Amino acid sequence: MHDLHVTGATGAAVSNAISGGSFGTSVQAGTIHGGVHVHHQPPPRLVPMQLPPVPVHFTNRTSEVGLLDRAWDASQGNGAPALVLLSGPGGAGKTALASTWAGLRADRFADGQLYADLGGFRPEQPVEVTQVLGGFLRALGVAPDEMPITVEEQGSLFRSLTARSRLLILLDNVTSAAQVAALMPGSAGGMVVVTSRLRLAGILARGGTLVEVASLTQDHAVELLERAVGRTVEEAEAQQLSDLAGLCAGLPLALRAAGARLAARPRWPVGRMVRELADEQRRLAALSVDEGMSVTSVFDLSFRGLSPAQARAYRRLSLHPGRDFGPATAAAVVELPPDETSDVLEALVDASVLEDMGVDRYRFHDLVRLHARERAAEEGGDAEARAVLECILGQYLRVAVAVDRAVMPGEWHVGPAYVREGRTETVSASAGETLDTLEDELPNIMAVLRAASDRAEHAHEHEREREREHGHELDQLIWQLCEAMWSLFLYRKHFPDWIAAYGMGIAAADRCGDPAAKSRMYHRRGLAFHNLRRREEARADGRAALEAARAAGHEPAESAALQLLGIAARASGRYDEAIETLGRAAALDRRAGQVRSEALAQRLLGSAHQAAGHIGPAVDALERSVELAAGLSDPPVLAMSRVYLAEALTRAGRADEALELARAAWAVMEDSGSRQYRAVVMMAWGQAAEGTGDLATARQRLLSALDHFTEAGVPDLRPVRTALDRVEAALSTDSREPPIA
C-alpha cells in the first residue's frame, strides 16, 4: 500500500481536485511520518482577482453591457461556461468593457477572476498557452514543484481545479480559437470573455456570443473627453470640444489621448487641439501621449498581422476618396478576381481594420483610414495613389455606362467608353431599380470626381511632361464619367451634384482640347440651369455649347446646343426666337439622319408653339415627334412625346384622344425612376380628364402630380397648383348645384 503525500496549499488544491470537491473548499492536508498522520489546516485560500483596473474615464457601453448580461443568462443550465467574444479595432476599449462588466457583476464569480494577455498583436511572439496555464494554476494554489510539465497535463489539472468554480476568465488579445479551447474551465458556472481584433469564427462555432465593440457615438465621445480633460470646459468651447470628438472619430483611445494632452496643458484652449488635429498629416502623431497611449502604435500592430495581399488591399482601398465602397470597386482597386477580393475584404473585416456596413458595403474608421494612407504613402508613394484613382474612375465609368445604356438606349455619345465597353452588360432590372444602383453610389462618385479633378488640374500645371500626361489620362476619364452620369441626373434631379459634375467635366474636356466633349458638358450643365429657372446661365451654356460643337464640326452636338438655346428662349418668353432656333435644330437632325434627336427637337418645337398659343402648329410638330419616336427602341422618348401631344390636344378640344395618350404614357413612365417625368404624365392626364368633364379623376391625378413635382424638388409649382385650384373650384360649384326636381 502506497501512502499519498499531500502538502501545504498545493496539496489542498490537488486533493480537492481528485476528490471532486469545489475549488476553495477547506480540506485537511497532512504528512505521514512513520505511519503516524500529522494533520494541519492549510493556509487561507487566496481568491485571484487579476482583471485590469477599470479606466477612470470609462463611458457608456450600455448596449454592450446588456449583451454580456444576456450571454451570461443564456448560459445558465446549459452545462457549459458562458463564452463571449468582444471584437473590435485596436483602441476601441474592449478590455475596459470587460473589466467594467466584471466589476458590475462581481457577485456572480465568488471564486475570483483570472486574466491573461496572450499578446496576439504585439511585434514579438504571442504568449504560449502553456505559460498562461502555468500562471492560472499558480493563481489557483499549485506550487511550482507540483506543476505539470506538458500542456495537456496542465489543461487537465486546470479543468479539474475549476470543475465546480464560479470563475470569470478574461483572455485578452487572442488570435485563434485554439488558444481559447485550451483555456476553457471545467465548470458550467463560470464565464470566459475573449477580446480580439479578429472575428474568430471558431469561438462562435463553440457556442460563443459575438459582441462588437465599435466607436462611441458623438454624444458619448464628448462625455468621455469632458472627463479626460479633467477641468470644466467653458460653454464657449462646447462646440470646439464636439469638433475635437469628431476628429477622434469616437475611438476611446484617441479620445483619452486628446484629453490627456489637454489635461497636461491646462492653459491650452480646446481650439488649439482642434487646429492641431485638423491637419490629417499630423493627426495620428498628435494622438500619442506615450508608447502606452499611441493610436499609431495600436494600428501598426494590426497592420503587421495582415498577409501581403491583405496589407496591399488595406493600403490601396484607403485611397478611395469616398466614404464607403462595394466589392466590385474593391476588386478594381486591389486588382484581384471577385472571389479573391471577397476573401480579402472579409479578412480585413475579421481583423477589425475594415467595417462592414451591410450587404456588400465596406468602410474604414476615419483614423484607421489615415493610418492606411500613411502606409500607402510610405510604400507606394504618389504613383500608387494615382493608379488607385484611375482604377476607381474606370470602374465607376463602366457601371455608369451600363446604367445609362439601360435607361436611355438610343442616346448618342461622345465618349469612347461607350464603344470600348461594348454591350456586354445585361441589365434586367427596371429603369428605376437600375438608377437606384447608381444613385446609391453618387456621393462616392462625386468624391472621386473632385479628387481626380484636383489632381488633374495640378498635373496640367506641372513642369514635367510625364505628369501632364497623367493629368490628361485622368481628364479623359473625368469627362467621360460625367457624360455617363446623364440619365441619373436627368431622371433624379440631383441639381447641386449635376451642376458640380459638369463643371468639372467642362474643365477636363477643355484641358484635353476636345471641343465635342466640351460642348456635351456645357449642354448638360445648361439643362440643369434651365430646370432651375436660371435662364441667363442656361443661355450662356447654350452659346458655349454651340461654339464648341461648331469648332468640332459635330452636328449632333450642334443640334443639342440649339435645342438648349431654344428652350431657354421659350422660358424667357421669346417665342419667335425659340420657334426659329428649334426649327433649325430639327432641320439639322433631319439632314444628319439623327432620328431620336429630331424627335426631341420636334417635341420642343411643339411645346414652343403651344406656349405661343399656336395650337395647330403645336399639334403638327408633336404628332411628327410621336411618329419619329415610334420608330425607335426607346419607350420613354415615345411616352414623353405622347404626353406633350396630349397637352396640346386637350387645348385643341380633343381631350378624349389626349386621355388615351396620357394613359399609354403612364404605362411606360410609372417605372421610369423619374419623379418629375411621372409628375408631367399625371398633370397631362389630369388636364385631359378635366377636359372630358371627369373632375374627380382630374383632381386625383393633379394631386398626384403635385406630390411627384414636390418630391422631385421642382422649384415652380404654380402651373400644377393653378390647374388643381381650377378643378377644385369646379367641383365646389358642382356640389352647390340644386338637385333636379
Image: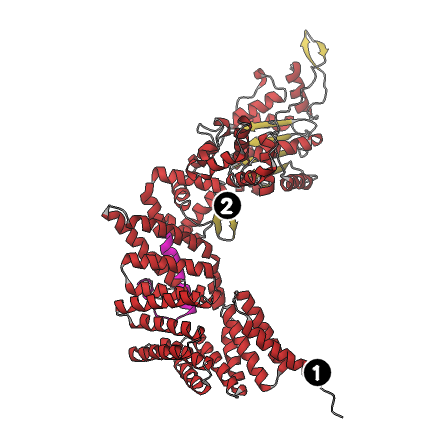
The residue closer to the viewer here, 293 or 586, is: 586
Quarter of the rendering containing residue 602: bottom left
User: Residue 377's spot in the image, x, y percent?
Assistant: 36, 39
- x, y percent for residue 118: 52, 29
Region rendered in magenta: 391-418
Identify the residue at image location x=39%, y=74%. 566
Q: Residue at x 66, y 24 (%)?
A: 17
For label 1, count other residues whose C-alpha is less than 10 Å away and answer few (under 14), some (14-19) or many (20+). Answer: few
Where residue 437 appears, as percent x and y from the top left, is: 47, 60
SS at circle 2: strand
Please, is residue 5 above or below residue 381 in the view?
A: above
**Magenta segment main secondary structure:** helix
Q: Which residue is mark 1?
A: 735
The residue to which callout 2 is attached is 355
The answer to whether residue 3 shows anywhere in this view is no
Residue reaching furthest right?
A: 741
* Amino acid, disc 1: Ser
Hey, which residue is sitting farthest top in the picture?
Answer: 34
Q: Residue furthest bottom?
A: 741
Q: Residue at position x 39%, y 52% from top?
A: 450
Q: Is residue 522 visible?
A: yes
